[in-house]
Image: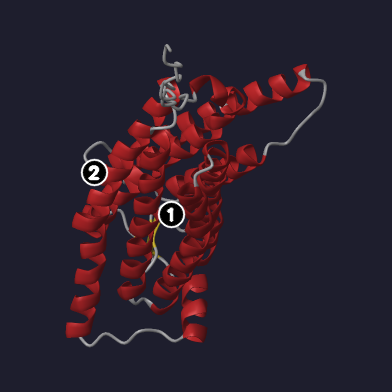
């Protein structure tokens, strides 16, 4: 492999170095969380494999893999000339990681819904995983056929999913106080920023690319030819002109999104103490009953 491009004068090298450092930090935080839960489990006298740890591991390490070997799926561009950089491998890793990520959200929302008896939050927890499975199908359609319309629909479904999550968190945060309420409010603010990015940058970018391809009468690939293409074709480039539109979403995705997965995993730290942060409902005082006084005779 040629590493001559790894110089401070190359913006792509600086960007890739950032992804690498963030991934190392994320793995370190995950390792600390995992060690903590292993120790707590051993103190209780029984080893437990928490599903949230497994789901978080899939997302953290999946994103680290994609950070080390970045690629742009539809364009078939990569930083390193290796079969591990192929779209088939990268998209498969991404699909598993993203489904695990949304399952984390579903588990947390379902638990909070059970504690608060919120039918709305319970409904959202049941809806978001099927929505993201459909989004993943749209993503695969886009990368196989090279039709950006699939990406536009995929990211629109992510926007709908997190709009529902934000609505559920707003409904739930009035039920709690302290650090739990603060965490929910912080999550809502983060989701709002993510939605603004999706609506103003990400989805319009894919729509613009789709319209440009239509105007240029681009021929999209068929399913069989597309799967062969994603398995065998990739072009190595270290030119910022080829990567500049991917840098924003990848940087946010491999940093902030992973941090949210780690935060969801750390929900295990407060799950057993949620009742301490649960706000007691205010009961209305019963009206004072007037006693009948017998009249003097």
Expressed as whole percent of the image width and height from the top left, the position of residue 230 reads 47, 72
Q: Residue furthest right?
A: 45
Give how far apart the Cα atoms at labels 2 and 1 are.
Answer: 16 Å
Q: Residue furthest front?
A: 297
**How many neighbours does mark 1 have within 10 angstroms: few (below 14), some (14-19), or many (20 or more)?**
many
What residue did someone put label 2 on?
A: 11
Q: Is residue 140 visible?
A: yes
Quadrant in the picture for residue 78: bottom left
Expressed as whole percent of the image width and height from the top left, the position of residue 235 reads 38, 65
The C terminus sits in image quarter? top left
Residue 145, placed above or below residue 48? below
Expressed as whole percent of the image width and height from the top left, the position of residue 156 reads 32, 63
Which mark identifies residue 80? Answer: 1
Quadrant in the picture for residue 155: bottom left
Q: Residue at x 32, y 58 (%)?
A: 237
Residue 270 appears left or right of 174: right
Given residues 6 and 77, the one toward you in this image is 77
Residue 133, placed above or below residue 142? above
Q: Residue furthest top?
A: 296
Given residues 210 and 104, the one toward you in this image is 104
Which mark identifies residue 93? Answer: none
Q: Residue at x 23, y 79 (%)?
A: 213
Tag 1's secondary structure?
Answer: loop
**How many neighbours does mark 2 have within 10 angstroms: few (below 14), some (14-19), or many (20 or more)?**
some
Residue 135 appears left or right of 212: right
Q: Residue at x 34, y 52 (%)?
A: 163
């Amino acid at each position: 492999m040629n590493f001559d491009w790894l110089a401070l004068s190359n913006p792509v090298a600086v960007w890739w170095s950032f992804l690498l450092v963030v991934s190392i930090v994320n793995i370190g935080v995950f390792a600390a969380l995992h060690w903590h839960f292993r120790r707590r489990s051993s103190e209780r006298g029984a080893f437990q494999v928490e599903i949230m740890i497994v789901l978080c591991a899939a997302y953290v390490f999946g994103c680290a893999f994609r950070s080390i070997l970045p690629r742009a799926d539809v364009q078939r561009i990569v930083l390193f000339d290796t079969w591990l950089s192929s779209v088939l491998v990268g998209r498969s890793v991404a699909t598993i990681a993203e489904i695990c990520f949304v399952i984390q959200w579903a588990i947390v929302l379902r638990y909070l819904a059970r504690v608060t008896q919120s039918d709305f939050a319970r409904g959202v927890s049941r809806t978001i995983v099927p929505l993201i499975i459909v989004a993943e199908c749209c993503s695969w359609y886009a990368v196989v056929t090279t039709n950006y319309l699939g990406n536009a629909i995929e990211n629109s479904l992510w926007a709908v999913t997190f709009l529902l999550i934000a609505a559920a968190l707003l409904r739930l945060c009035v039920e709690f106080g302290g650090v739990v309420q603060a965490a929910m409010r912080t999550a809502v603010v983060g989701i709002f920023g993510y939605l603004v990015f999706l609506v103003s940058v990400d989805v319009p970018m894919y729509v613009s690319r789709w319209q440009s391809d239509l105007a240029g009468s681009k021929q999209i690939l068929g399913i069989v030819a597309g799967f062969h293409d994603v398995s065998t074709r990739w072009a190595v480039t270290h030119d910022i002109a080829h990567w500049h539109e991917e840098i924003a979403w990848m940087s946010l995705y491999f940093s902030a999104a992973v941090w949210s997965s780690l935060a969801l995993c750390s929900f295990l730290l407060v799950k057993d103490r949620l009742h301490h942060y649960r706000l007691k409902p205010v009961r209305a005082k019963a009206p004072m009953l007037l006693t009948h006084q017998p009249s003097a005779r």
